[in-house]
Amino acid sequence: MRIAIIADLHANLEATTMVFKEIDRRKPDKVFCLGDLAGYNTQPNEVIDILREREIPTVMGNHDAAVCGIEDPWFFRNAAKKAIQWQMDILRDDNREWLSKAAEQIVFKNVYLGVHGSPRSRDDYITDWLDAMRQLEFLNGRNISVCFFGHSHRASFLSERGPEQSVSAGAIHELNPQNRYFINPGAVGQPRDRDPRAAFGLFDLEALTFEFCRVEYDIDACAKKVMKAGLPRELAKRLSKGA
């Protein structure tokens, strides 16, 4: 059984479309989403519609919670807050209702956990090995061997029994069943690891491997929509930088 893991789509229809085109080509058995369908870009309805039509299990991200009015985005940076406020006006009621019912966490096959930020909170960032190790206490007492997370927008492979391993497009990492891992597939809609291509991951449950995948998409088209909507210029510019 193979599972595609996606995260941080952020209303980027161009990236989302190309990621699903590649996922369909690779034909996994299941797709899971680690949240943040909303925020930063201009097409939250179209992105949400894709996941709804495909009936993809989805975790609620912090931008999702904000655009639904569940959390106040007071702590967001100014550009992110402006995008949320703009999206609150255009988000359809049916999509707001669907998004507001997204799960806090997803557990599959009893031992694999999907979260947005961390096992403790969707607002936590896991950016390095030490961050991951601080989260182990929230897995203690649970039979969880792998925690998949998003939120940092950086592809990451973090092992309990070793330092952070470098990741690159096409890299396939083997998992030891006696170990625990924190894995971020990278961001679909706004990567921040200096690779502007849309990211996702493929988890093979039988082989116990995780593959980091990247796909090209029309960055200029997405950026032009951001500018046309009157959103902050920095949101458009960072797409091509992967930062």
Image: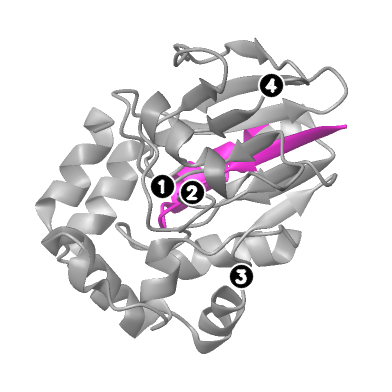
Q: Nearer the viewer, mark 4 or mark 3?
A: 4
Q: Mark 4 packing: few (<14 Cα in 10 Å), some, or many (20+)?
A: few
Q: Mark 3 packing: few (<14 Cα in 10 Å), some, or many (20+)?
A: some
Quarter that holds the N terminus: top right
Residue in front for this viewpoint, 145 or 214: 145
Q: Secondary structure at mark 2?
A: loop
Which residue was labeled with disc 2?
Answer: 118
Mark 2 to mark 4 CA distance (whole Å) = 18 Å
Mark 1 to mark 3 CA distance (whole Å) = 16 Å
Label 1–label 4 contact, CB within 8 A: no
**Identity of the amino acid at label 2?**
Ser
Residue at the (36%, 45%) spot, across then down: 125
Q: Secondary structure at mark 1?
A: loop
**Identity of the amino acid at label 4?**
Asn
- For marks 2 and 1, the one nearer the N-term is 2
Magenta span of residues: 1-22
Q: Position of residue 237 (x, y in %)?
A: 16, 41
Mark 2 to mark 3 CA distance (whole Å) = 16 Å
Residue 144 visible to the viewer:
yes
- For marks 1 and 4, the one nearer the N-term is 1
- For marks 2 and 4, the one nearer the N-term is 2
**Identity of the amino acid at label 1?**
His
Q: Position of residue 182 (x, y in %)?
A: 56, 32
Residue 88 sits above or below residue 73 on the image? below
Q: Nearer the viewer, mark 2 or mark 1?
A: 2
Mark 4 to mark 3 CA distance (whole Å) = 29 Å
Q: Which mark is residue 238?
A: none
- For marks 2 and 3, the one nearer the N-term is 3
Quarter that holds the C terminus: top left
Q: Which mark is residue 179?
A: 4
Residue at the (50%, 52%) spot, across then down: 116
Q: Position of residue 52 (x, y in %)?
A: 67, 67
